[in-house]
Amino acid sequence: MPHPVTRLTSALWVAQSRLYAMNSGLWVSAGTACLIDPGIRRDEMDRLVQAVAAQGLQVAALVLTHSHWDHILGPEPFPGVPVVAQAGYAAALHAAAPRTRRVIAHLEAEQGVQRDHPFPLPQPDQTFTQTMDLPVGDLRLRLTHAPGHAADQLTVYDPASGTLWAADMLSDLEIPFVSHSLAAYRATLATLADWDIQTLVPGHGAPTSDPAAIAARLGEDRAYLDELAERIGRVVAAGGSPAAAVAACAEIHFRHPAANAAPHRCNVESAYAELGGAADPAQVGWSQEV
Ligand SMILES: [Zn+2]
């Protein structure tokens, strides 16, 4: 059975996938709704379709927080609903299209999904560059470009309640997956640190409204990225190798060390290339994964 769609705040419902604990959102106000990253499995999307129908909601928009495969499956079950994404979405989707198609084909085959044509990669109906306001009933959701994990990532924020949909950041399960840019990720978190965040929903893992937990996730993730930048920067300045960067970062503290060992290594290799180390960014780290 798919996990239920549960009410997190007066305006936000959340459903968590059995895959990667990925969260899908349903903002609701005055009979109007906005979906965030519906997914991942078919039965989970069907449950969101039922939740919309049961409340008789008019779905005004479907927001894709970024172009990674696990976040883009949702538009198909909601035909006619305008898809909103950041301006870099189409290029990022195109760049990763072969792998995205492969992973989705595998996922659908495993669920017994039959198709005449391959999965249609969703294209946005509306995009923005830096920020945009999205009215949903009485809500004014603010979408903001938030690069670092992905070049096209966005966050969704409700200023009235201080609720932040953080896309693939600030998880209690994952460390920062720096699959786009370390510099951009640090800048994005520095910006978020100034926001009034009363409720935090990560793309993967547990939402929280505990001020201490919100501060801890932000503080830990910023400290982790600072450590990466400092240690790898020193290795690069000394003309060190990728292996030297990995060794220099072996003692960095991060959450769930066993589960996050591989992402940490990808972070180190990609950051080494980004900071000017002697490696082709297309041949190391996250380039081999996403
Ligand atoms: Zn992602």
Image: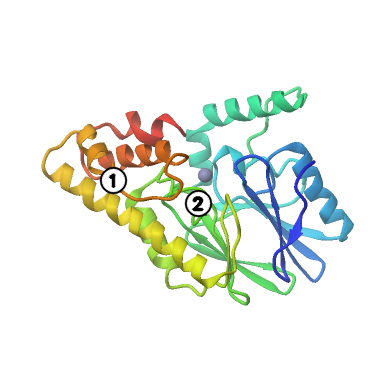
Give residue 95's mark.
Answer: none
CB at disc 2 and ligand 1 closer than 8 Å = yes
Task: Look at label 2 and name its amino acid.
Answer: Gln
Of labels 2 and 1, the one closer to you: 1
In percent of width and height, residue 104 lies at: 63, 30
> Mark 2 or mark 1: which comes first in sequence?
2
Question: Can residue 36 be seen at all in this image of the molecule?
Answer: no
Q: Nearer the viewer, residue 174 or 289?
A: 174
Q: Which residue is mark 2?
A: 153
Residue at (77% x, 46% y) in the render? 78
Secondary structure type for disc 2: loop
Work out which quarter of the rendered image holds the N terminus and state it: top right
Residue at image point 58% right, 73% down: 162
- The residue under the point 75% across, 70% down is 137
- Number of other residues with Cα within 10 Å of mark 1, as a class: few under 14, some 14 to 19, many 20 or more: few
Number of callouts in the render?
2
Gap in angstroms between the C-alphas marked 2 and 1:
29 Å
User: Dot 1 corresponds to which residue?
Assistant: 251
Which sits in the foreground, 119 or 46? 46
Q: Position of residue 122 (x, y in %)?
A: 64, 40
Q: Position of residue 253 (x, y in %)?
A: 34, 50
| Image height of 260 relative to 85, above or below | above
